[in-house]
Amino acid sequence: MKLTILGCYAATPRTITNPTSQVLEIKNRLFLIDCGEGTQVQLRKNKIKFSKINHIFISHLHGDHFFGLIGTISTFALLGRTTDLHIYGPKGVKEIITLQLKLSNSWTTYELFFHELESKESEVIFEDNRVIVKTIPLKHRVYTNGFLFQEKPGERKLNVEAVQQYDIHTAYYQKIKGGGDVTLDDGTVIENEKLSFDPIPALSYAFCSDTVYNEAIIPIIKDVDVLYHESTFLESEAALALKTLHSTAQEAATIALKANAKQLVLGHYSTRYDGIERFKVEAQEIFPNVLLGDDGVSFEW
Amino acid sequence: MKLTILGCYAATPRTITNPTSQVLEIKNRLFLIDCGEGTQVQLRKNKIKFSKINHIFISHLHGDHFFGLIGTISTFALLGRTTDLHIYGPKGVKEIITLQLKLSNSWTTYELFFHELESKESEVIFEDNRVIVKTIPLKHRVYTNGFLFQEKPGERKLNVEAVQQYDIHTAYYQKIKGGGDVTLDDGTVIENEKLSFDPIPALSYAFCSDTVYNEAIIPIIKDVDVLYHESTFLESEAALALKTLHSTAQEAATIALKANAKQLVLGHYSTRYDGIERFKVEAQEIFPNVLLGDDGVSFEW
């Protein structure tokens, strides 16, 4: 699982910082999460192939999370894309995009599918044979969802030495990978554990931005491997965080702790601060495993 | 008069090139012309003060000319702007912007005035005591206008030595600047030419992008000081220019020649070419005074 942060600063794009957008590579799928202005250029800078992105998830309709969407969609069309593109986001996103395409008399060369979200409960919005994606209802100034990406557990790995030792026919291999025992011709039952190894653990990633401190999300993201939680402010601006329905680094860390996350990634920093190191220091007073998200940075798990 | 080109490449923003946007400073007014994605960052890079921009002109609703508008408007609001902002552009621009502001529940801190254009004839869309702006109807795939910015002639300059010599009272100075003669107490009439110098010549600037080669614009831009005319293609792609309703560098030069422009500035280059020097070479075969527009470049007249 690989996370590439294209932008993770709040409010307005600047010469040196970009608004929210990130790419999650999980089980060989590439998901684009949020799409602030300039995302298509950040994709190019980070050498992400446009053609590998088939699903875009938009948390909410504040500009720093979606003003780059129409440009990305248009550029995909200008480049002659033919593969379907799926957009998941709040109700209204379809109207905005189609109005702009209509007024510019520029239609896409590919099918564009909108999956508009309105539910205030967590729901499954994407599922295939490898990955499942659920919404994480967040509390912000407009209707907002985070997204939980979960790998499905893979097959068990064949213990090649063991199956050869028991002289097991290849016809049984798929059954073994699926967790089944094998009965030999003489009636002996060989337990699966002797014939296979555990699968690579299924990983999960939760994207939570933007949101005020909200313990209601904890059951949804419980035991998540990696939690990206917005930390717009330092603790000195805790009152402002509450007022604007954002979080502090310590609040992000508290959610990570209570949700038993293995790793916390911070981001969505207010540009009022000179540097971001202090966000990590404050978060680590509560939760140890903190990574500082930053534009152009990638993490792998 | 100073022109700063923020972006002048066609189609999609890239890591090294920006879509159309430029700032014209004329008679101490600052006009933003077109607003492709990333314009607000280009404004910052070129140290243009956001607060000095009160008028934005949008030629047409193709993405590379206006996808940065909503972000620019939003950022002005986030920075607490209170001064009125006027947007001039094709019918539909108001619906796009207000829909996005509504869905993000983010209203501006300042008054936003839309001047929607529908006419197919040239019309005056802005006028104050120093500058007049007219549309230049262009031929493109959607409804498109260029814009002609004209300085109004200034006052004549007082010939300080002469007025002292004739011992003329300061009460007459404004009359002299306005072109009036002065009658002395003894009845002698002193002609204005003896008391003042010609005003600084009034300059004009025509922005023509995007458009196919179209001689119908020549009467509107006749004798213009500076003509920015799109040159998406080189002559080798003349057929493609016609098909996509764009122009070649030589077509831009032909318009400059026939309109008796003093200076041609090229731009809106297709990104298919390795460099832009060839655009100048081809244009100069027809019209000598050619400047290559490029991102971040300024010209003064």
Image (cartoon, coloured by chain):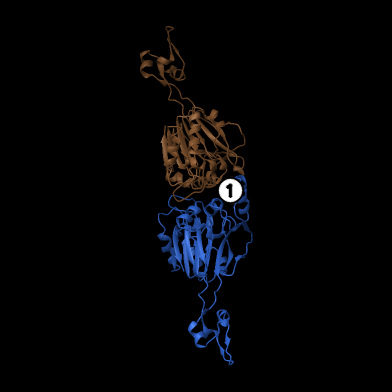
Chain colours: A blue, B brown
Seen in the picture, residue A158 relative to B113 is either above or below; the reply is: below
Residue that appears at 52% across and 30% down? B221
The amino acid pointed to by label 1 is Leu
Q: Nearer the viewer, residue A61 or B185?
A: A61
Q: Is residue B101 left or right of residue B277?
A: right
Q: Is residue A277 left or right of residue A84?
A: left
- Structural crowding at the residue carrying mark 1, measured as other residues with C-alpha within 10 Å and reported as few (<14), some (14–19) or many (≥20): some
Locate residue A114, reporting x and y percent. 62, 57
Q: Secondary structure at mark 1?
A: helix
State the residue lying farthest toward the top: B186
Locate residue B224, reporting x and y percent. 48, 29
Seen in the picture, residue A66 relative to B80 is either above or below; the reply is: below
Seen in the picture, residue B216 relative to A20 is either above or below; the reply is: above
- Residue bearing the label numbered 1: B101
Q: Nearer the viewer, residue A182 or B152?
A: A182
Chain letter of the residue carrying label 1: B
State the residue lying farthest toward the bottom: A186
Quadrant in which the N terminus of chain B appears: top left
Q: Nearer the viewer, residue B275 or A275?
A: B275
Residue B159's image quarter?
Answer: top left
Is residue B95 shown to the viewer in this render? yes
Locate residue B91, reporting x and y percent. 61, 40
How many marks the image carries: the answer is 1
Is residue A86 shown to the viewer in this render? no
Quadrant in which the C terminus of chain B appears: top left
Locate residue B20, reporting x and y percent. 50, 43
